[in-house]
């Protein structure tokens, strides 16, 4: 009889203990059933999603440091926009924030390996696309207007990649972003 009572109490206690996320903290994903937060197994590459984003913006209304994981769909891919391209697209972030996630296109991934004279567009939208910090040397060159300037460096290892963006928006916001792609989809 005591075993039956203990088992009836243990299961709800385990569920409550493992689902309690703490004040202001988001629960981690990729938990094995029955594991609490401290023992959760993270995906390879250090993040809990398709890619990890570390973004710092200096100046402007959205100045700050943002660290998020791209989860669900989106992520890093080659060849989506055309042969030789590399893209990062976000659909869902963890944790959710005012930063919507990066939308980046490297038009010549081979040139991005050296980081010199790379044509790219990088948009970092906020508040459901109400404001976007944009570094877009591609449009600056092709349209002759100031859409920001900067450099992009890509370390594409095939199934994983690291993309680094350093630049300044047309509004003067300094942008430093590192995207660690935990998986790369090739089209």
Image (cartoon, rainbow, N blue to C red):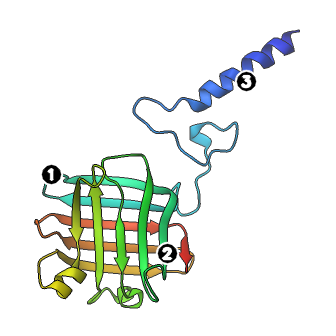
Q: Residues within 10 Å of mark 1 (few under 14, many from 20)?
A: few
Q: Is residue 46 visible?
A: no
For the residues labelled 1 and 3, say whether their Cβ atoms are less than 8 Å apart: no
Estimate the x, y position of residue 38 in percent, counting from the top left.
57, 40
Of residue 71 and residue 15, the one placed in the foreground of this image is: 71
Estimate the x, y position of residue 176 in percent, counting from the top left.
26, 66
* Local SS, label 1: loop
Of residue 102 and residue 114, the one placed in the foreground of this image is: 102
In the rendered image, the vertical position of residue 90 relative to residue 64, given as above or below:
below
Q: Is residue 13 visible?
A: yes
For the residues labelled 3 and 2, say whether their Cβ atoms are less than 8 Å apart: no
Taking the spot 53% from the left edge, 66% from the top edge, the residue there is 182
Of residue 140 and residue 33, the one placed in the foreground of this image is: 140
Q: If the image is split into quadrants, where does the N terminus sit?
A: top right
**Residue to which mark 2 is pinned:** 77
Where, by quadrant of the figure, is residue 108 drawn? bottom left
- Between disc 3 and disc 2, the foreground one is 2
Q: CA distance from mark 3 to mark 2?
A: 42 Å
Left or right: 163 with respect to 62?
right
Q: Which mark is residue 61?
A: 1
- Between disc 1 and disc 3, the foreground one is 1
* Local SS, label 3: helix
Q: CA distance from mark 1 to mark 2?
A: 31 Å
Taking the spot 46% from the left edge, 30% from the top edge, the residue there is 22
Number of marks drawn = 3
Q: Which mark is residue 11?
A: 3
**Pointer 3 or 2: first along the chain:** 3
Left or right: 128 with respect to 169?
right
Taking the spot 35% from the left edge, 60% from the top edge, the residue there is 54
């Amino acid at each position: 009889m005591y075993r039956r009572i203990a088992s009836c109490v243990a299961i709800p206690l385990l569920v409550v203990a493992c689902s309690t996320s703490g004040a202001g903290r988001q629960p981690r994903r990729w938990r094995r059933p029955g594991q609490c937060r401290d023992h959760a197994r993270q995906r390879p590459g250090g993040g809990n999603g398709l890619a990890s984003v570390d973004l710092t913006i200096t100046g402007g209304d959205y100045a700050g440091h943002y660290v998020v994981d791209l989860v669900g769909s989106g992520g890093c891919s080659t060849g989506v926009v055309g042969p030789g391209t590399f893209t990062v697209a976000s659909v869902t972030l963890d944790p959710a924030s005012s930063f919507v996630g990066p939308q980046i296109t490297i038009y010549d991934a081979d040139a991005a390996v050296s980081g010199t004279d790379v044509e790219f567009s990088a948009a970092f939208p906020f508040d459901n696309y109400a404001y976007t910090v944009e570094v877009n040397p591609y449009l600056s060159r092709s349209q002759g207007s100031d859409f920001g300037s900067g450099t992009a460096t890509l370390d594409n290892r095939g199934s994983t990649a690291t993309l680094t963006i350093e630049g300044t928006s047309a509004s003067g916001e300094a942008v430093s972003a590192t995207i660690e792609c935990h998986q790369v989809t090739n089209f």
